[in-house]
Structure formats: C-alpha cells, structure tokens
Image (cartoon, rainbow, N blue to C red):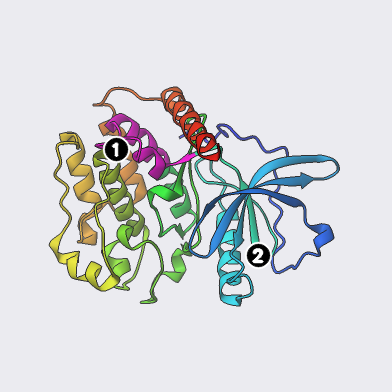
Amino acid sequence: MNKRHDYIHAPWHKVYLMFNQKLPHKHVRYQKVHKIDEGGISEIYLAKYSIPPASYRWVALKALKPRFAKSNEFINQLEREAQLAASLNHDNIVQIYDFDHRSIIMEYVQGLHLKYILNCFTNGIPANMAIYILLRVADALKYAHQKNILHLDIKPQNILVSLMGGIKITDFGVARALSDCNSSEYFSGTLNYMAPEQLMMEELDTRTDIYSLGLIMIEMLTGQPVHSYKSILHARQMINHGTNIHSKCIPEELYPVISKCLSNDLSKRYQSMNHFFIDLLERQQQLPSFDRFQMAAFMKKEFLKKRRNINDKKK
C-alpha cells in the first residue's frame, strides 16, 4: 500500500504528547465546536486546535464523559490509548496529535464510518468496494502488528471512510501491546466482534484481529452482523456452533478467505495479517476494478445526503 498521506496534510510533523500533565485553562489550545460521536465512556467533538503562533487546524477531540473524567482507571485507559496510537504512523490509521490528561487530540476525518455506509445498502455493499476497504484496513492492522500492537476492537464503527475515498481505522481504546496479551485477563471490546479466544479469556495474538475482520467481511457483503449475542455467557455457549458464512450475497471466490479468517482452530486461521492481505489481493483480481475515485464519488453523494437529512431535521 502507498504510505503517502491521502487527504489530510499536517502542517507540522512532530507528534506532541503531554502525558500526565493537567493543563491550566489558559494553556488549552483547542475549542470544541460540536459533538460528532460518542462511545461508552467518551465523547468525540469537532474542535479547532490552535497551532502557534497564529494558525489552527480542525481536529477530532476525544474526551471522557463527565462521570468518568475523575476516575484514574479511565484516565489511565485514555492515556494508554494515546500512547499506543501515537506510536503508529500509517496512512490508514487516525493520527494522534496531542494528549492533555482527559482528552486526545487527533486527526479529523471528514466522512462517514463504515456502519453508516452499510446501512445505505439493503443486502451488503458490492464485493469490489468491500475488498477495497478491507485491503486498507488489513494494511493498517498489518503495520500495527509489526509494531507489536493488537487493536482488539475492530468493527464497522471504528473504520472511517473519508470524502476523498481514504480509509482509516480508529479507537485504540482497548488495544494492547502483544507482550501484554499472554495472560487470561479479560479484555474488553465489542461482544459481537470478539474472537473465541477473547471470549474465553485465553492468550491473544495477531490472529485475534484477523477473526474480527472476517466477521466484518461477512457483514459488509450481506448487510447483516454475524452475531447478536445477548451476553458473554450466550456468546461462549455459541462458540462451538461455528459461524454460518453461506449467503447468496457472498461471491464464491471469497468463501475460502472468510472460512480461513473464522476458524476456531488457530492453527487453521491465517497465521498473519500479511497472509490475509496477500490472499485478498489475489481475489481482488477476479472482480471488477474499484478505486479511490469511485469510493470518493460514492462518499460525496452519501455525505451530502446525510447533511441534507440533518438540515431537514433542524427545520
């Protein structure tokens, strides 16, 4: 994959992190504009970020919700996320710019997350579009794995598509260094996208992210999430039932790839993200071409449609 920045060019290149510092109000260099998303413990805002002496840039600001902002546990979790994500520099990973004890300042991607895009289709997105997105997500994860970092929460909501057709993964909130994944500690994440070894509190490795990507691949092609677990106990009970991957929406040439991603037997799963990437790249040759310009054309149409819907609701 091309490592050139696709669509957001930073006017400065050094990532400035201020870990373990409580900044006085007069030194805060950002101004919130409006909320654009939220998760379980945090909210994400569009913000204007000051760059001395007299410049600024638009950024995304991830801040702990007020009821979690005084908890050392959640502050430490946010700090760990900032540290891990800031150590990664890849075109398909949202860049971290700054950290100020309770907030992460990061690259703002003007576009939509993958879950919104999937909702635009009745029976999944076209296979060539799916592979275009998956290859870039796999390239980002391959790079993170080379840096010994597991994401552990890959899902459509954490995959962003820009108006220019760029793909970015975000939210390293439950990510771990590979060296920290050899215990039976329970790792949080999103239940419906967890690998069996996550659910069973077993040792994790790069193949854990591969399993999650296989679940996303089915969802992209069929338009439906694979699992809808009611609880972690329910999820554990369903592990041995396997995953039904058969659907008329999935091209025959992609069945072997999905099956290899979702094997409960780790020895039969892809042994690295690079193996998955190469296999998927070969399958791409069997489908009609799909490039960044086609992705951008689709995104601009859907983004404008979303804008119009928002404006209509405000009237």
Q: Position of residue 73 (x, y in %)?
A: 56, 75
Range covered by the magenta-colored residues = 112-136
Image position of 281 with respect to 44: above or below: above
Image position of 179 with respect to 298: above or below: below
The residue at 65%/45% (across/down) is 59
Q: Is residue 45 left or right of residue 30?
A: left
Q: Position of residue 182 (x, y in %)?
A: 39, 72
Predominant SS along the magenta part: helix
In the drawing, what numbered circle is on residue 102?
2
In the drawing, what numbered circle is on residue 169?
none
Tell me which amino acid carries mark 1: Leu
- Is residue 132 part of the magenta span, yes or no? yes
Residue at image mark 1: 280
Q: Position of residue 112 (x, y in %)?
A: 47, 39
Q: Position of residue 301 (x, y in %)?
A: 45, 26
**Discs 2, 1 touching: Cβ within 8 Å:** no
